Amino acid sequence: MSSLRGSGAAEGAGSTRVARPGDLSAAELEIWRELRAKSQAPQNPFMEPEFTLAVGRVRSSARVAVVYEGGEPAAFFPYMRGRLGQGRAIGSGVSDCQGIVARPQLALSAGELLRSCGLSSWEFDNLEDGQSLFVAEAAAEYASFVIDVGAGYAAYETVLRERSPKFFRTTTAKERRLGRQAGEVRFVFDERDPAALARLMEWKSAQYRRTGRRDRFAQEWISTLVHQLAHTRAPGCSGVLSVLYAGDAPVAAHFGLRSRTVLACWFPAYDPEYAKYSPGLVLHLRMAQAAAAEGIGMLDLGRGAAEYKEALKTGEIPVYEGAATRPGTGALLHWIGREPSRRAHGFVRERPRLAEFAQRSLKRAARLRGAGS
């Protein structure tokens, strides 16, 4: 164990153990779950040990620092370790909620934690609100869009009818038209058919390519991670595949993670042949209805502006992007490697006309690549 004693550390907050996720004991995993359950934050499944365990099975760089206080585990800090001690959030690139799971008022500084992990920096892009250990290191704040169905689906539908009456009428009319023209519409909230997951991943890969974005499912570790989580069944973190059918044909689908009270929306996609029916919007309304019936109070649509999120949301919660660093060469290399790009992206995002031009350019480049293949 490496010492955490030093300035700002309370007596008894004496050591940390760094382990691979799979090496954590059953007792440690249960303490992790208990700490998370006592948190005042929404019970986002990305913060549960099951997500970290799944990442650990596909990424050899995955680690967890277990911080002790009074001889007992008091915090769990999952991360991925890169070259020269540069760290990233666990599952970086696909994780939509990041941070440390710890006792309230744990006497610990970010510098002490990084030192105990042998990290020169720790980069995050979806830091959870309330993560006081790291939020001061954030370079930018973003909105993660949410749907509140805590009062039931009928209450949410009332909000939609009042705030966006045209959107709601149009979407429900398209659902009826889909049923008339393509076959009876049915929805499965928790579909277990592997073929449906494969179809969703095909649609999503095509969408990434069509819009000029990197295909996440072309990365083997992400594809394997999703398949593993599809079979994960735990109260705090379960994979949920939701599918909208017209007749026997799947027309839209979504794979996400759920806890008892939060559905973290992750990978939605639809069959472009049915685009005129807006099957993705129909799917999300059906998901909200089914989630409310399951006792889920919130659907987290994630950060990143999108028309469908604006139409469906009832509110927003903040998430943060940035990096905690320790003085030294590693921190300097992090700054050189990341900050110029981050600032350039921020410059574009803050200027809608420029952002729109950049998006059109990405799509044009994608079409050219497709034509040349």
Image (cartoon, grey):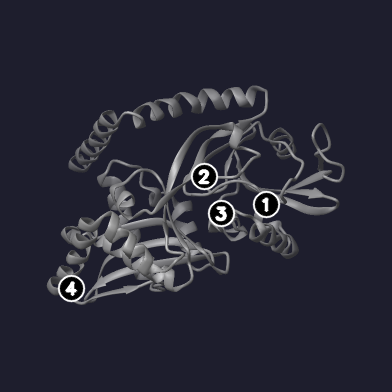
Type of the residue with mark 3? Val
User: Which badge, 4 or 2, comes first in the chain's sequence?
Assistant: 2
- Identify the residue position indicated by label 2 in the image: 92
Using the image, tell me which numbered label, if any, was put on residue 51.
none
Type of the residue with mark 4? Gly
| 226 relative to 68, above or below | below
Q: Which residue is depicted at the point 25% across and 30% down?
A: 353
Element type at mark 3: helix
Mark 3 neighbour class, 10 Å CA radius: few under 14, some 14 to 19, many 20 or more: many
Q: Nearer the viewer, residue 114 or 54?
A: 114
Q: CA distance from mark 3 to mark 2?
A: 10 Å
- Identify the residue position indicated by label 1 in the image: 20
**Quarter that holds the N terminus:** top right
User: Which badge, 1 or 3, comes first in the chain's sequence?
Assistant: 1
Asked whether residue 86 appears in the rendered view, the answer is yes
Q: CA distance from mark 4 to mark 2?
A: 40 Å
Element type at mark 4: helix
- Identify the residue position indicated by label 3 in the image: 55
Element type at mark 1: loop
Q: Position of residue 315 (x, y in %)?
A: 41, 51
| Image marks 3 and 2: residues in contact by CB distance under 8 Å | no
Type of the residue with mark 1? Arg
Q: Nearer the viewer, residue 9 or 14?
A: 9
| Image marks 2 and 1: residues in contact by CB distance under 8 Å | no
Q: Position of residue 164 (x, y in %)?
A: 26, 55
User: Which badge, 3 or 4, comes first in the chain's sequence?
Assistant: 3
User: Which badge, 2 or 1, comes first in the chain's sequence?
Assistant: 1
Marks 2 and 1: which is nearer the front? 2
